[in-house]
Image: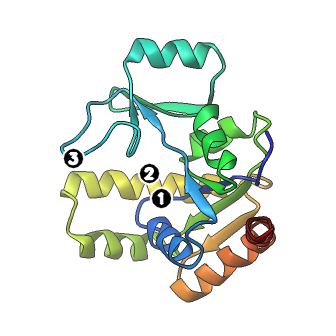
Amino acid sequence: MTGPRPVVLSGPSGAGKSTLLKMLLKDYGNVFGFSVSHTTRQPRVGEVNGKEYHFVTRDQMQQEIDAGQFIEHAEFSGNMYGTSKAAVQAVQARNQICILDIDLQGVKNIKKTDLNPIYISVQVPSIEVLEKRLRDRQTESEESLLKRLNAARIDMELSNEPGLFDLIIINNDLEKAYSELKEILAEEIQKIQESKKS
């Protein structure tokens, strides 16, 4: 695959990935782009096909997976989700760094492809900190919150596997976490900015 190296961002819900991404997009808006994932779930109110997701049937998606057109895919609560090669190439064609927000299962699948991204894991300092963040959000039922905490515990353990990530950011201090993120991406960001000038 040609074009700028994509960035794989992983980490538990509540670790601060979305916040860090918003900061990156605010500072370098035209440098980054998101691949639009595919899903077999029904669109929610206000979701637009091709914007939030490519909404497809299970048959359609399975055919494309079988044809090798997906970088990674997984199933959650009875629905399939995945990232197609075309979705990443569409971002690279706009001369942007493609950001993939992917779970650990997806990270391991991408390791088997020729994508060659920069792998970054965003983690919380501790489960206690995460629990406080999730409770402060007040968006979760108790059952959902406990599920997320359990998933985060597993995520934190597995993320420490040597060689899995190029960088693990412990998001204890947002500014420090953001500067670590910018530092590992500096070279790719600079390449894009220079090529956009020429």
- SS at mark 1 in the image: loop
> Dots 3 and 2: beta carbons under 8 Å?
no
Q: The disc labelled 1 sits on which kind of residue? A: Pro
- The residue at which mark 3 appears reads as 46
Q: Nearer the viewer, mark 3 or mark 2?
A: 3
> Residue 115, which numbered label?
none
- The residue at which mark 2 appears reads as 151
**Residue at left offset 70%, top offset 56%:** 119
Q: Where, quadrant-wise, is the C terminus in this rendering?
A: bottom right
Q: How many marks?
A: 3
- SS at mark 3 in the image: loop
| Closer-to-camera residue (57/87) | 87
Q: The disc labelled 3 sits on which kind of residue? A: Gly
Indicate left or right for 42 with 125 as reference. Answer: left
| Closer-to-camera residue (89/9) | 89
**Residue at left offset 33%, top offset 32%:** 77
> Dots 2 and 1: beta carbons under 8 Å?
yes
Q: Nearer the viewer, mark 1 or mark 3?
A: 3
Residue farthest front in this picture: 198
Q: Is residue 94 above or below residue 15?
A: above
Q: Position of residue 23 (x, y in %)?
A: 51, 77
> Dots 1 and 3: beta carbons under 8 Å?
no
Is residue 162 visible to us here? yes
**Residue at left offset 66%, top offset 74%:** 181
Spatial CA span between label 2 and label 1: 7 Å
Q: Is residue 26 above or below residue 54?
A: below
Q: Position of residue 193 (x, y in %)?
A: 74, 71
Spatial CA span between label 3 and label 2: 29 Å
Q: Tell me if mark 2 has few (under 14), some (14-19) or many (20+) residues whose alpha carbon lies within 10 angstroms of its own.
A: some
Q: Where, quadrant-wise, is the N terminus in this rendering?
A: top right
- The residue at which mark 1 appears reads as 12
